Image (tube, rainbow, N blue to C red):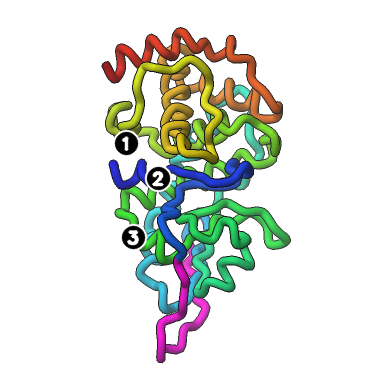
Amino acid sequence: MKHLRALLAITVAMTFLLGLTVATRPVELRPTENVECKKAVLTTVSGTVTSSSCDGELAARASALLDESVRGVADIVDIGSTKIAWVKRADVVVPASEPELVSLVGPAFADMAGIAIRDGSGQRVVLNRVRAAALSDLELRVLLRHEITHVATRDLTSDSAPLWLVEGFADWVAFHGLGLSLRQAAPLLTPDVSALPTDFGGPGRDLAYQQAYSIMVYLESALGERGVVDFFLRHASTSAVDPGEVGVAGWRAFLGTSIG
């Protein structure tokens, strides 16, 4: 999971659209040389995975995890008092080349492992075939669940919603049920917190994501699973959350007892 948490870094303000990233260096996606790659579509109960036939291995892995990922997200987000009107399906796209990837997500996001987008073709999860292929099945599952959470809650989420809320919630759903301790899932955490995280685009972004996730774990300890979902749905359409509703002192004390 250390490798996975290293991917949790987003570099722009529109992070609520995004998921995991491995932005370590530029990557150029190229079709396999001397091989004719054709469009291929794998269909599951809960969606589709569209890719080049030359990326069949990644597409097959994503397809095998898709139904479970959609079901896992639905099992959590649908327990809230407010019912979310989403289709409980996800369409995944694996672009065959860098120009195709950039055309879908834009140049600023082309180095990310996965991105949830909405365009004229609807909502889709776009996978960077180089970055995503390097993930283990567990990491790929977390990536898919994180992005599918964004898909499921998109219509209820304001563009200006606090990133700690939107990304923390997506991580909380993505890691739910994996049996990991808070320390395992968020190794950078310390109890030394005095305010809600804001540095999602600077040098402290990895820690900010892990703090955001830990806030949701803390809220779960106080409110239960349904309480966390209701908290998110109550605030996702706003541009700010009163820190008093989180309880920074309580969060700090929770971290002290949870991670030492």
Which of labels 3 and 1 is toward the front? 3
Amino acid at the residue labelled 3: Ala
How crowded pointer 3 is (Cα within 10 Å; few <14, some 14-19, many 20+) is rated as: few
User: Would residue 204 appear left or right of 137 to someone viewing this image?
Assistant: right
- Dot 2 corresponds to which residue? 142
Q: Are marks 1 and 2 in contact (CB under 8 Å)?
A: yes
- Dot 3 corresponds to which residue? 134
At 41% from the left edge and 91% from the top edge, which residue is drawn?
Answer: 34
Which of labels 2 and 3 is toward the front? 3
> Magenta residues, as a range?
27-43
- Dot 1 corresponds to which residue? 178
User: Would residue 218 appear left or right of 237 to someone viewing this image?
Assistant: left
- For residue 158, above or below residue 87: above
The outermost residue toward the front is 203
> Is 151 covered by the magenta stretch?
no
Q: Which mark is residue 199?
A: none
How crowded pointer 2 is (Cα within 10 Å; few <14, some 14-19, many 20+) is rated as: many
Which is more N-terminal, label 1 or label 3?
3
